[in-house]
Image (cartoon, rainbow, N blue to C red):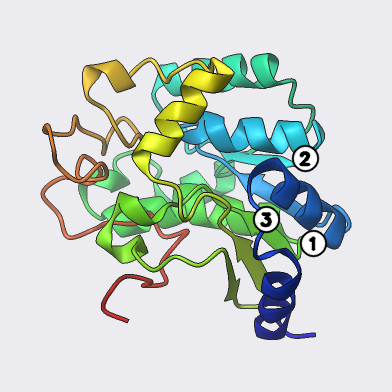
């Protein structure tokens, strides 16, 4: 069955589910050949909590680019312990990758896209080998490029699942409060979307939450999510 047909099937079977029941259903549907990819950023705790509620051993992939904030790494450890996650897989660029593509560690100053590809896309592609689907934390309200985000989408031969696509900021905040989830320590300082420390800035009040990523450039995605699914389509 090709990915587009599988999307239709998943939508028919599980399109009305949400939260932990949805994640439990897709975990069963893919027989474990599915993982949740998390940045452990400002909004990540809600989706991780839902996955832990579905099953504590829901596989979680965390891409450590080697240039993440120390606060993000400590927050990851806090959430893993707090939520009881038992299968968190850290991946990142290999020594050979860096020696060939960024030996001085300064590629981000020359080419954002090349740096993201080397440090994030390539490691994730390796981690996804053998998986039929992956879960993302993307939401429609985050950016114009995500405004028409579906629950299930086909990308190549894999399925991407976006359980929080229809959630707005208020609903996320309510869930944080209801569950007593810890916040990313940089959020209170104005960092609303957090990637590498080299390319993340504070967000101005009322601005697009992702405007602090690669500020001053036309870049809006790291390269993992490149399909345009905004209102223009």
First of labels 3, 1 by sequence position: 3
Query: Which disc is residue 78 wearing?
Result: none
Q: Secondary structure at mark 1?
A: loop
Please state the horizontal and vertical placement of residue 71, each as a whole percent of the image: 42, 17
Precedes in sequence: disc 1 or disc 2 = 2
Q: Which residue occupies the foreground of this view, 99 or 146?
A: 146
Is residue 42 something one can see in this rendering? no
Q: What residue do we see at 73% from left, 31% from top?
A: 52
Q: Which mark is residue 17?
A: 3
Residue depicted at x 75% and y 65%? 132
The answer, for residue 142, to whether it is visible in the render is: yes
Left or right: where does residue 63 sit relative to residue 134? left
In this figure, what is the number of numbered marks? 3
Q: Any mark on residue 130, and which?
A: 1
Position in image of residue 167 (x %, y %): 45, 47
The picture quadrant where one finds residue 206 is: top left
The span from disc 3 to disc 1 (Cα, nearest Å) is: 26 Å
Please state if 40 lies on the left or on the right of 37 as rendered: left
Crowding around mark 2 (Cα neighbors within 10 Å: few <14, some 14 to 19, many 20+) is many
Q: Which residue is mark 2?
A: 58
Q: Secondary structure at mark 2?
A: loop
């Amino acid at each position: 069955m090709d990915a587009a047909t599988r999307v239709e099937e998943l939508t028919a079977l599980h399109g009305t589910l949400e939260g932990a029941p949805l994640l439990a259903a897709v975990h069963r549907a893919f027989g474990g050949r599915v993982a949740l990819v998390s940045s452990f950023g400002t909004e990540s705790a809600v989706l991780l909590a839902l996955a832990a509620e579905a099953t504590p051993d829901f596989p979680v992939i965390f891409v450590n680019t080697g240039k993440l904030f120390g606060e993000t790494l400590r927050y990851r450890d806090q959430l893993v312990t707090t939520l009881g996650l038992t299968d968190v897989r850290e991946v990142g660029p290999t020594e050979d990758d860096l020696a060939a593509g960024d030996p001085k560690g300064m590629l981000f100053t020359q080419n954002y896209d090349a740096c993201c590809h080397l440090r994030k896309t390539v490691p994730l592609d390796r981690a996804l080998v053998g998986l039929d689907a992956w879960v993302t934390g993307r939401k429609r309200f985050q950016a114009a490029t995500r405004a028409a985000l579906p629950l299930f989408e086909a990308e190549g031969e894999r399925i991407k699942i976006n359980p929080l696509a229809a959630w707005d900021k208020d609903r996320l905040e309510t869930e944080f409060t209801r569950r007593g989830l810890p916040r990313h320590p940089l959020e209170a300082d104005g960092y609303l979307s957090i990637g590498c420390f080299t390319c993340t800035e504070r967000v101005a009040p009322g601005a697009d939450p992702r405007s602090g990523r690669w500020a001053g450039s036309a870049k809006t995605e790291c390269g993992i999510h490149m399909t345009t699914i905004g209102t223009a389509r």
